[in-house]
Image: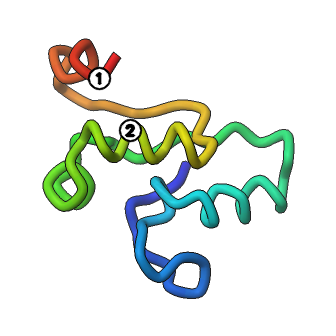
């Protein structure tokens, strides 16, 4: 599970959950691993980046699964 934390050694601009460099780094450690995000409705990602943009960035970065808690309507809008 990747967090919405900024790891400046990996990517100084984006949190790991939406960072192509962050996901690439994790997959280099274990290429068979499946990557899932923390809850995408958390304010640290939905407020700062915007949930639709965060999903788009995560998909392009190579995330396999996305977590959305407590808000089925949000999941439908993103889908």
Q: Which residue is drawn at 42% across and 68% down?
A: 14
Q: In the rendered view, does 28 fall on the left or right side of 71? A: right
Q: In the rendered view, does 43 fall on the left or right side of 37? A: left
Q: How is the image coloured?
A: rainbow
Q: In the rendered view, does 10 fall on the left or right side of 57? A: right
Q: Residue at x 50, y 63 (%)?
A: 16
Instruction: Tell which residue pokes out farthest to the bottom in this image.
Output: 9
- Rendered view: 62 above or below 3: above
Q: Which residue is drawn at 54% across and 31% down?
A: 65
Which mark is drawn over residue 78?
1
| Image label count | 2
N-terminal of the pair, mark 2 or mark 1, is: 2
Q: Is mark 2 on a helix, strand or loop?
A: helix
**Where's residue 30, x and y in %?**
84, 52
Q: How far apart are marks 2 and 1 (CA)?
A: 8 Å
**Where's residue 41, x and y in %?**
22, 41
Q: In the rendered view, does 30 fall on the left or right side of 21? A: right
Q: Which of 29 and 53 is in front in this view?
A: 53
**Where's residue 1, x and y in %?**
55, 49
Q: Which of 66 and 56 is in front in this view?
A: 56
| Among the 4 quarters of the image, the one containing residue 26 | bottom right
| Among the 4 quarters of the image, the one containing residue 15 | bottom left
- Rendered view: 34 above or below 79: below
Which mark is drawn over residue 19?
none
Tell me whether circle 2 and circle 1 mark residues in contact (CB < 8 Å).
Answer: yes
Quadrant showing the C terminus: top left
Q: Which residue is drawn at 58% across and 48% down?
A: 61
Q: What element carries label 1?
A: helix
Label 1 crowd (10 A; few <14 / some 14-19 / many >=20): few
Label 2 crowd (10 A; few <14 / some 14-19 / many >=20): many
Q: What residue is shown with label 2?
A: 55
- Rendered view: 48 above or below 39: below
């Amino acid at each position: 599970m990747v967090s919405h934390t900024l790891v400046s050694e990996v990517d100084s601009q984006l949190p790991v959950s939406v960072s192509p460099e962050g996901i690439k780094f994790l997959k280099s450690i274990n290429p068979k691993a499946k990557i899932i995000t923390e809850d995408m409705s958390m304010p640290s990602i939905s407020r700062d980046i915007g949930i639709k943009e965060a999903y788009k960035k995560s998909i392009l970065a190579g995330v396999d699964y996305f977590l959305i808690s407590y808000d089925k309507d949000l999941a439908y809008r993103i889908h």
